Amino acid sequence: MRIFCLQLFILMSVSLFGQKNHHQDVTASWKCGETGKTLDIPATIPGCIHTDLIAAGKITDPFKGTNEKDCQWVGEKNWTYQTEPFSIDALILDREVQRMRFNGLDTYATVYLNDQKVLVADNAHRSWEIDVKKMLKASNNIIRIEFLSPIPVGNERLKTLYYPLPGEAIRAISRKPQYHYGWDWGPKLLTCGITKPIEIIAYDDIRIENTYLRSISDSEQKTETQIELTIHSTADRKAHVRIDIDKYSEKFEADIELRKGNNIIKLPISLAYPYRWWCNGQGAANLYTYDIEITNGDQLLDRTIIRSGFRTVHLITQKDSIGESFHFELNNQKVFIKGANYIPIKYFPGQAKKEDYEKLILQCKAAHINMLRVWGGGNYEDDVFYELCDQHGIMVWQDFMFACSMYPADSLFVTNVMAEAEEHTKRLRNHPSMALWCGNNENAEGWERWGWQQGLNEKQKAKLWRAYLDIFDLTLGKAVRENTNLDYWQSSPRYGRGDARSLTEGDSHYWGVWHDEEPFEVMNTKIPRFMSEFGMQSFPSQSVVEEMLVKPDGGYADAGLLQHQKHVRGFKLMDKYMANWYNPVSHTDLRQYGKLTQAVQAEGIGLGIESHRRHSPYCMGTMYWQLNDVWPSFSWSGIDYQGQPKLMHEMLSVLYAPQLISCIVEAKNLQIHWISDNYLPTENATMLFTIKKLTGEIVHTSAPISVMLSHGSEMILNTPLAVLGVAANGKDHMIEVEIKTTKETYRRNQKLSFQNSLNYIPTVVIAVKDNPMTKKNEERKEIRYVLLQP
């Protein structure tokens, strides 16, 4: 029999209990099975029913071949999890307060402790805490959790509404990860289970339930912070608070008086010359450790340790002559956002390890990414994700977990959502990486532009829009305002791509490229104030393709490949975009075909990124869809299911670099732009450029040109192609640019036009260069173009 541990820990921070506060790691074995039948399947906690069934050999891995469709019955059944009898330490049983906390139950769960019903849960995005003082025993404790299928429960809930839910009603009615119902990049696997650890918390005197480091004012000279402690006390008592902050020698101390029940203690702290937290590329991600102890005489009552940083961050939306701005300011400095959209790191709970998060965040840091958008159809991420973003300077745009549907606003649903929003806004508010809360993904656009209002009468429309405002304006907006210092954005995007305002106000999800089959080149003219989604599908690495195949030698029409393509026109559109730029490769050669789809994706998304950066400060951010994958698939990701970067992600080392040389053919002219994210002094430089045919023949070599380099985006050359001896469209030509300052040399090797008839594709190479500032050789990534071998 395998033994699994119910890990017990306090979530808000690293919490260490003193003499009278205890919590216990309860060693117990878990088993599961279909409700009403024998529970004989060993279970892993945290986990879910699918991973337990796979481990027991009851189902085949749904990620392989066509196995997904053979596992659909799992989501239609009810399942039960139960421990073997376990013991409780006497130190727990002697405490006045004894609580049990369930940090993740997916989704409709009834919990029994020693045959007493103690909890009915209905939200996978929440934790649940109950009083168990009268139920725990020294030995022979048993926890049983019964999970209901979300399908019949959801259908019954829908019957109670007085209006239909446009979008996907069966998923919208349940507070369950929305992607479990299937998406255009992932499978439909309606799992259930105990997704996060269970805690037992016991104490006699007090418990620090929550800590808020509320910034009052922040400057380079001084920061004013109010530390707000939410403390539960079992009686009226006096206590003493001591706060140590690393890098500062002084201690902050205060005597406090606590009343029985919940208390909010506010302690002002002033710190001189703090090191501020900066995002990737703008400075160091400086962090401080707060060690907070509450004592009574020599007795430690409770202690919490929090890692945080000093920064101010705001989303600035101001009316201007064009429409309305949309940009982020970090420490009162405008920051151009170079980001990506993040979906869950693993499909099933319990699968992601700390090493997986570390690898992904480090890949982002190396690619110069400074913001990740946690997409609203997934999960609120584990603490480790935000801790790593804090550490490595990656800002977080955090969606609430709502996507692509209208949602109900009856009292049961709203109360549930209020508790969910309250929990996560408080849980995440001390992370300096947190930059924005957003209400939902594409719900407003869907209501206005996706035909959701068709067939509804005026009364139904009014109720649905009222429900929308109740959730996304009143409920979620209020939680952000009351619990954080962050700004709130109601829906991403504000307007859909068919609305002209989507290019002059708010953020934009521009899917004219891909869904509407527009050419990549439209991204040179359709420039939004902030691009929060755009993308292009490609093949993953060959080893991932092999995971999808039913037959090892299967081809393009292999049933497994078809099962893993979740966009109805996915293969067709990859063919179309390939044909626009390249001689198509035969479908029979999956390796070469996949390589070429990655080249099209890399160059197409690169074209968009460069256009957005060139148009700064009108456009102040670009976030491609999507960073990662949840299973082996054909998707828009830059990093595939096995964690291998596609060519697009590799190219970010150039495209998202702090300094970028960007060349474009515009109105029969060659334009060269200098783009810099760093606030450095303006300096003189010398530029040289050479134009070649793709065959290597030199067409033009410039004389040295004096240019001025500064922050932002600036055109430093605009000259007719005819003067350079190049055809008006720049077809089949490349340009090599070199810009030298007294301290640095910048180079760029770029096509003038992607519309060519030769299969030259980009590849990332490592170039060793001498850095004049350090007098050392340094490795740097560069993009070169090579001929795709037939």
Image (tube, grey):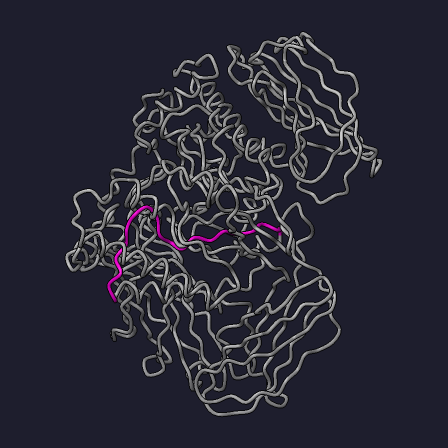
Instruction: Identify the residue at image location x=41%, y=45%.
Output: 493
Q: Which residues are magenta?
A: 392-411
What is the x, y in percent for residue 614? Answer: 60, 33
Decide if residue 27 is in sight here: yes
What is the x, y in percent for residue 660? Answer: 66, 32
For residue 308, above or below residue 66: below
What is the x, y in percent for residue 117? Answer: 25, 73
Q: Is residue 426 magenta?
A: no
What is the x, y in percent for residue 637? Answer: 46, 36
- In depth, the one of 693 and 72 nearer the eye is 693
Instruction: Identify the residue at image location x=69%, y=20%.
Output: 736
Main secondary structure found in the magenta portion: loop
Decide if residue 356 is in sight here: no
How many numbered marks, from 0 up? 0
Q: Is residue 398 magenta?
A: yes
Q: State which quadrant residue 470 falls in.
A: bottom left
Q: State which quadrant residue 88 falls in.
A: bottom left
Residue that sits furthest to the front in the current view = 321
For residue 685, above or below residue 139: above
The quadrant of the picture occupied by the N terminus is bottom left
- Apparent side of residue 277 relative to residue 32 in the rendered image (left or right): right
Q: State which quadrant residue 311 falls in.
A: bottom right
Instruction: Identify the residue at image location x=23%, y=55%.
Output: 462
- Apparent side of residue 763 relative to residue 571 in the rendered image (left or right): right
